[in-house]
């Protein structure tokens, strides 16, 4: 069974750093693109970017380029999303999600993590 | 970036009636080389992550009830729920995977009338 399990909720202050995680299981982690999606309170879904775990090739969405860093650890089948300095506007639910065709960037998001709620106070 | 626009923003339908949600892309998401539309529909219930319902514009994901269907090509697409059930109350999103960045519609909230 394919599963993406994310790290727990975080409460941070503006200016603090943060790294959240997403561990994949039940499939060949290195063979599928994986992405991060932001959902601000009461709002819709925004793709922040996608990454190929095989060589860490990363495609950031323009709105998020330079704002966050995606990474992976193939040895533990884990993807990461990190901020060097959080702002109150980063308060949101963050989902990791797999692109569903093996080896293909042109795939829909098929499996999703349960979400990590990040709350940033000013 | 390809901009995805859904209509309506919200919809109230009686149980057992048909619900129709539209999604329009700012440029074609059809690859003529394989005649596939790179368009998916997902359902998000309160407090849950999204769930994939339809991909290639009209292919139902395994386990999705056949009352859900997708249609359309090029830039105009439709998600239809043929007979609304109580458990279908959710927000529905289209997204295109034709080119990066992947982009989503703003969502359509479906409620029971």
Image: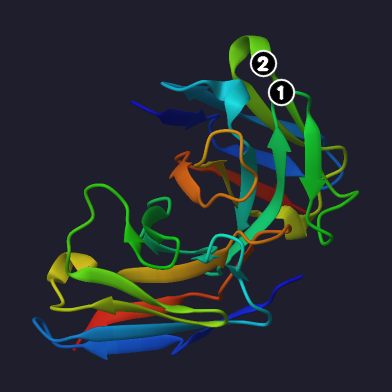
Give the camera-side residue of A64 and B62.
B62
**Residue receiving disc 2:** A74
- Residue A55 x, y percent position in the rendering: 78, 24
Q: Is residue A26 left or right of residue B64?
A: right
- The relative height of residue A54 versus residue B41 in the rendered view (above or below) is above
Q: Residue furthest front?
A: B33
- Residue B104 x, y percent position in the rendering: 58, 67
Quadrant for residue B41, please give it.
Answer: bottom left
> Mark on residue A15?
none
Task: Please rate how many residues cluster around mark 1, counting C-alpha atoms within 10 Å: few if below 14, some from 14 to 19, many from 20.
Answer: some
Give me the residue at 46% from left, 69% from top.
B93
- The relative height of residue B84 versus residue B9 in the rendered view (above or below) is above
Q: Is residue A96 visible?
A: yes
**Residue receiving disc 1:** A54
Query: CB under 8 Å between callouts 2 and 1?
Result: yes
Give the camera-side residue of A75 and B90.
A75
- The relative height of residue A63 versus residue A83 in the rendered view (above or below) is below
Q: Residue furthest right?
A: A66
Q: Residue furthest left?
A: B16
Question: What secondary structure is marked by label 1?
Answer: loop
Q: Is residue B53 left or right of residue A44?
A: left
Give the camera-side residue of A65 and B35.
B35
Q: What is the image's colouring?
A: rainbow
Quadrant for residue B59, please give it.
Answer: bottom left
Question: What secondary structure is marked by label 2?
Answer: helix
Q: Is residue A82 left or right of residue B34?
A: right
Give me the residue at 47% from left, 31% from top.
A4
- Residue A30 x, y percent position in the rendering: 62, 22
The Cα atoms of the two marked residues, 2 and 1, are separated by: 8 Å
Give me the residue at 55% from left, 63% from top.
B38
């Amino acid at each position: 069974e394919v599963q993406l399990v994310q790290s727990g909720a975080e409460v941070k202050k503006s200016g603090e750093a943060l790294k959240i995680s997403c561990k994949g299981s039940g499939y060949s982690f290195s063979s599928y693109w994986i992405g991060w999606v932001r959902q601000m309170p009461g709002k819709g879904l925004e793709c922040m970017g996608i990454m190929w775990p095989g060589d860490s090739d990363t495609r950031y969405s323009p709105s998020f380029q330079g704002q966050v860093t995606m990474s992976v650890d193939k040895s533990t089948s884990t993807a990461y999303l990190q901020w060097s300095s959080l702002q109150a506007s980063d308060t949101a639910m963050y989902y990791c999600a797999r692109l569903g065709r093996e080896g293909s960037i042109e795939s829909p998001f098929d499996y999703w993590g349960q979400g990590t709620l990040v709350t940033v106070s000013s | 970036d390809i901009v995805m626009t859904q209509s309506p923003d919200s919809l109230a339908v009686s149980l057992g009636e048909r619900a129709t949600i539209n999604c329009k892309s700012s440029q074609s998401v059809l690859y003529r080389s394989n005649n596939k539309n790179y368009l998916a529909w997902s359902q998000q219930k309160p407090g849950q992550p999204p769930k994939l319902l339809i991909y290639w514009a009209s292919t139902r994901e395994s386990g999705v009830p056949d009352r859900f269907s997708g249609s359309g090509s090029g830039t105009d697409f439709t998600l239809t729920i043929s007979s609304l059930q109580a458990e279908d109350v959710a927000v529905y999103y289209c997204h295109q995977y034709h080119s990066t960045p992947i982009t989503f519609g703003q969502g359509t909230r479906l409620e029971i009338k």
